[in-house]
Amino acid sequence: MREKLIFEEVSKIYGEGDTEVKALDRVSFHINEGEFVAIVGPSGSGKSTLLSIAGVLLSPSKGRLLLDNKDITTLSSKEMTNLRLEKIGFVFQSSNLVPFLTVRDQLLLVAELAQKRSKVADYKADTLLERLGLSHRRNHYPENLSGGERQRVAIARAWMNDPEIILADEPTASLDSKRGRDVVEMLAEGVKSRGKAAIMVTHDERVLDLCDRVLTIKDGRLLEMNSTQKTNLKASYSNNFIS
Amino acid sequence: MFLALRELKFSKLRYFLIGFIMILIAWLVFIISGLANGLSSDNASALQNMKADHFVIQPDAENKLNRSQITDEQWKEIQKQTSIHASAPLGLKILSVTKMGTKDKMDITIFATDASGILAPIVVEGNQFNNTTKQEIVVDQSLKQEGIQLGDWIQDPETEQKWKVVGFTEGQTFSHSPVIFMNLKDWESLIHTNPQQKKIYYSAIALQIENNQVANLKNEVKDMDVITKDEALQNIPGYKEEQGSLNMMIAFLFVIASFVQAVFFYVITLQKTNQFGVLKAIGAKTSYLARSLIGQVILLTIVAILLSIGFTYGTQQILPASVPFKIETETFILFSGLLLVVSVLGSLLSLYRIAKVDAVEAIGRAE
């Protein structure tokens, strides 16, 4: 199985000397093709830092980082921007769509930023909206969409540049459990069918059963959840759902 | 422009409001500049339309034509200079005169000159005066508003000199008063009405001369000063003060325009900090976002300028004829360009903000 993303002994240190804070401490893991991985942990544990480094928004202080078999540990900010544009899809908390763009334009913006606006991009945007059941909303502005619809648009936008990996930052934070689950299912389905990978930071334990693996982070150290715990989680979720 | 245009379309009201302010400011700039032009020509069209580029005057006259005296000997000396293409003496006097038979006084400026020289006016109605006629004058047609017609006599109550109006000319005013042209003979008799004034003098000598020969001439003429037409213009009584205050208003308007736009776009940019973070995270370069903002500023300013130019022409139609208002294409082009420049300068503050937004802010943050 191909590895999409590899963290090798990655540390991130903020500040210097006495004020030094270790946000990430020698974190190592890898994510394979077709894998959907959840990261859980209390606030301040380093989840956001991990996601920012995986998303090439931050450079690690130490360690090595490989995306799609390419070393991306030390890049200039320009190279980082281009890499995000080409290889990474983001789904943020509460969607963060651009308020003045229609649903379809949200997707076309990605093509525009990559200077790849064409008939192909139009077709791709329309297909994605179709797949996520948003065709009837294509000319609506975000303010006229429900929370779930907005997150689906954000997912469609994330797929628009055909990324190697999708990074989702608490995508269910502003949704009720039913809609949250729908959104995560859509993410998972996309990852499987395209043979890509995804990391999702979440607080929402009810959707963890949809993930292939759950990584727990605490004080900057990574603990992988074992399969028993995961089965328990799944069971507890099913129970909740039935009752 | 993908983002810029869609944002303008989406936030119509917001951009309409700032656009409206820009229109008002640009409109006011154009109206004031029209007034400045109008007043300037109302004040000094006689000098502006003069076919001379330099004047020889007395050194102690503080560049004021009406204070200067050049003797006949000096005039003869100047005539000998070979570098001068053409020259003509000019006698200038500001008087209060009456139409004969009435008591109402009006201010006029006398331009006495060689009727066949470069300063002779172009007659639009009636006859030209010449160097042999006596007591015949050509006057600016604005005197028609005072009830002066061809054949009327004008009298100076102080010296009891009188002249007959034989022709009208146009665009000849000096210090907001109409100019009357007379020949040097009549000038001489006017001067001799002062018993202490035995010798004839002129106020200045108008010259046509190459710029690079001015320095030579300055060395050659003794006890005389050579000034440019513009220097003479600036020293017409009241001219500098009038233009100065209007130009100061225009300068302030440019500063206001710059700040209004700067503040507007800065506040909008601050409001969108989060959005810029997201855009940068999904791969938008700072330069792309900057182009988008500058595009909006330029588009908005150009539309505002074009509309306000239209409104300025409309204003000109409405203004009564007595208001001196003159539109000049060069001024429009210059001020439009300046407005565009100050608008773009004002947006630099926002660009700095955009450049400082870090893409990492998009993570771990709810709206």
Image: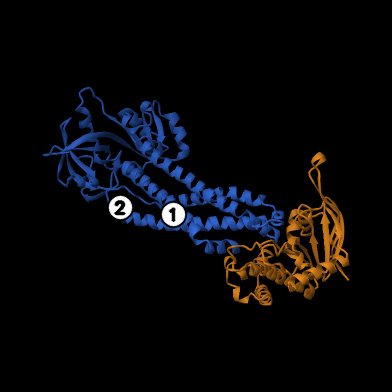
Chain colours: A orange, B blue
Distance CA(mark 1)–CA(mark 2): 19 Å
Crowd band around label 1 with a 10 angstrom C-alpha radius: few (<14), some (14–19), many (20+): many
Give the mark toward the camera: 1 or 2. Answer: 1
Residue B54 placement (x, y as % from top left):
39, 38
Furthest residue in direction left, as rendered: B101
Return the chain for callout 1. Answer: B
Q: Is residue A207 left or right of residue B337?
A: right
Q: Tell which subunit mark 2 falls on.
A: B
Label 2, on which residue? Answer: B319
**Residue A232 x %, y %:** 84, 67
Drawn side of residue B72 relative to residue A206, left or right = left
Front-lying residue, A94 or A140: A94
- Is B179 in front, or is B365? B365
Left or right? Give the position of A5 relative to B359.
Answer: right
Q: What residue is disc 1 on?
A: B23
B103 vs B38: above or below: above
- Determine the residue positioned at 30% across, 39% down: B174
A70 versus B330 height, above or below: below
Residue A27, label in figure = none
Instruction: Residue B345: give x, y in percent of width and height.
Output: 56, 48
Residue at 39% in and 39% down? B245
Hey, what amino acid is under mark 1?
A: Ile
**Mark 2 residue crowding within 10 angstroms, few (<14) / some (14–19) / many (20+):** few
The quadrant of the picture occupied by the C terminus of chain B is bottom right
